[in-house]
Amino acid sequence: MKTKLKIGGFTWDYNELEEVNEGRNMGSSTFETLKIEIQKDLKKDVKKSTILHELFHSFFSSSGYSFKSSKEEDDTVDILAMSMLQFLKDNPKFFKDNILK
């Protein structure tokens, strides 16, 4: 599934692959190539969290924000992704009525 996403003034390619970066990564986002890649066969909630995680990476990089370290960035986007996933699951009506409206 290949999709175009508008993020911070840039058009990113989103793609689901059998394997991401030939490693243990479940997803990746690369500002230099404007690509977000997600492993195709993840469990439903893991996939949702991974998509959010990579989107948050792309939000920060598209805005020009840089972290002190890659660990700080990963820790930050992990917190945001897990919190947002839980918020969306717990409050779907609120999100639909107040954000998507």
Image: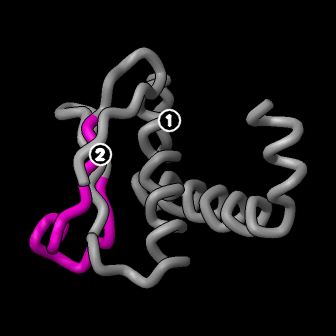
Q: Is residue 25 magenta?
A: yes
User: Image height check: is 101 above or below 20?
Assistant: above
Q: Where 62 sits versus 39, above or below?
A: above
Q: Quadrant of the N terminus?
A: bottom left
Report crowding for label 2: few under 14, some 14 to 19, many 20 or more residues within 10 A (C-alpha): some
Residue under the image location 79 percent in, 62 percent down:
87
Say whether residue 98 is magenta.
Answer: no
Label 1 sits on residue:
59
What range of the chain is rendered magenta?
Answer: 13-28
Tell me the amino acid under the disc marked 1.
Phe
Q: Residue beneath label 2, please?
A: 14
Where residue 33 sits: x, y (%)?
17, 34
Using the numbered discs, state the Cα–Cα distance from disc 2 to disc 1 in whole angstroms. 14 Å
Q: Quarter-wise, where is residue 31 in the image?
A: top left
Q: Dot 1 surroundings within 10 Å: few (below 14), some, or many (20 or more)?
A: some
Q: Residue at x 49, y 78 (%)?
A: 44
Q: Amino acid at mark 2?
A: Tyr
Q: Earlier in the sequence, mark 2 or mark 1?
A: 2
